[in-house]
Amino acid sequence: MSKSSTPTTCIYCSGAGPFTIEHVIPAGLGGDDKRFLLKKMVCGDCNTKVFSPLEADFLRNSTVALGRIFMQPSGRKRNGESNAPKFGGSSKHLLDADGRFKEFDFGMYGRPIILPQIVQSDDQTYNSSSIDIDSFRIFVQDAQTIMDDSLTCVRKMSDDEGSNMLATNYIWSNKQYVTAGAAEVVTKLPKKYLWQAEMEVVSDKNGPSYARLFKRRNGQLVIKIGADRDIEKVLTFFRKCFEQIDLGSIKEKNIENPLVSVTASFRIDIFPRMIAKIGLNLLAYLTGPDYVRISQFDQIKQTIVTGTPELPIVPEQMRADMLPVFAMVPEGHHMFVIAEVPMPNGHLQIGVVAHLYGSQVENVILGVNLPSSKLSLPVIFTVDYRAHVIEQYSFNAFFENYVRRLQETNE
């Protein structure tokens, strides 16, 4: 990789830093935390304020998220631990043997896991569920800690009001919760709170649920209530439930072949923007930062950062040329190819072609009318998304490696 001879500036916004280490390929997609990193190329503002939300949308709220939860056993390691990939979705419901809807989430390889929860059936009754007794016991203890004599509920404001939230305080008085003042706008979550969300219009054979309180995989406690329900009465109901629960009387019952329902909305621009960012990162890794700072890359950078203008239509020839290569991708691997196409004026067109989770293909033109990169393209990167290992190959080296693996398999 060549060294930069120009003053250090961010390759995306031209800012002077401070800089953070940027993964060439996201760790959540199977990238390596120790190799294939960009150093002193991407500033902290671009990394945290622009790319972190873009990457989260890509990994959890795009079409690639579906392949990820069923094929990739773990996402990025955090605090030394690996967790199953997360899927966003506005709601995830499982129908149990009694015809009741339960909150669930995806576990390893897409296995549905019932979250610990209590569902209010009417003003007097409820039912409870969890993946196991231990998880439910911890859920009860956490809920009892939060639902004490002073309780804070936090909910999102409307989308057009940025990241602000509304926090409402309640106090326990005369064996019920009552509101303690008007809701306040906050920008950070308090240390102890109950997340409030609106109940989806869901009815099972027992009729609509009044409310439900459950614990997400990240540890957050959530209360969902219908728009027509009195929040003070619902909070009071759940506190009394937790005071009366007899953990020793709970019986376990498996749910065989459950039906699941997922509601999600995807933005169609997220997938190509993220592939464009990975492609530009790969090109910067290969050439050094000076080459990707030239003006011919300004438009693709603007699209990656802001979403506009829309990405140009990619010639099918580039995709067609890569189809034989995709057939060589080992199972459990992604492939990214940086390729070039000569232009009639003697300049180059450089693009990236991505093949994810065995089926999803996206190709993006990174720049046109480009001078020579002095690279021998195409260059191929494979990502073992189960082991989090990236490998780089020339086209010939990749083909030789494929033939060698094929021979070893047949022996």
Image (tube, rainbow, N blue to C red):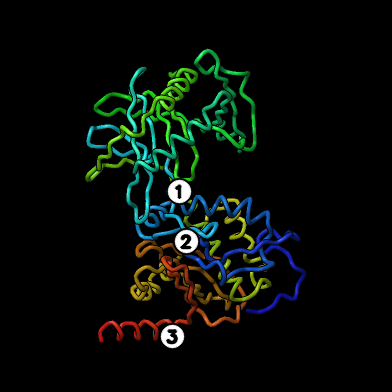
Could you tell me which secondary element the residue under label 3 belongs to?
Answer: helix
Q: Is residue 171 above or below residue 374?
A: above
Instruction: Return the residue at label 3.
Output: 396
Of callouts 3 and 1, which one flags the residue occurring earlier in the amino acid sequence?
Answer: 1
In percent of width and height, residue 215 lies at 44, 38
Could you tell me which secondary element the residue under label 1 belongs to?
Answer: loop
Instruction: Return the residue at label 2.
Output: 29
Q: Amino acid at mark 3?
A: Asn
Q: Amino acid at mark 1?
A: Asn
Q: Quadrant of residue 355?
A: bottom left
Q: Amino acid at mark 2?
A: Leu
Could you tell me which secondary element the residue under label 2 belongs to?
Answer: helix
For discs 2 and 1, the disc positioned in front in the rendered view = 2
Residue 61 - label: 1
In percent of width and height, residue 231 lies at 48, 20
Q: Is residue 168 above or below residue 176?
A: below
Q: Residues within 10 Å of mark 1 (few under 14, many from 20)?
A: many
Q: Which residue: 31% across, 39% down? A: 94
In the image: residue 212, left or right of residue 3 = left
Of callouts 2 and 1, which one flags the residue occurring earlier in the amino acid sequence?
Answer: 2
Q: Quadrant of residue 372?
A: bottom right
Q: Are marks 2 and 3 in contact (CB under 8 Å)?
A: no
For discs 3 and 1, the disc positioned in front in the rendered view = 1
Q: Which residue: 61% across, 23% down? A: 183
In percent of width and height, residue 312 lies at 51, 59
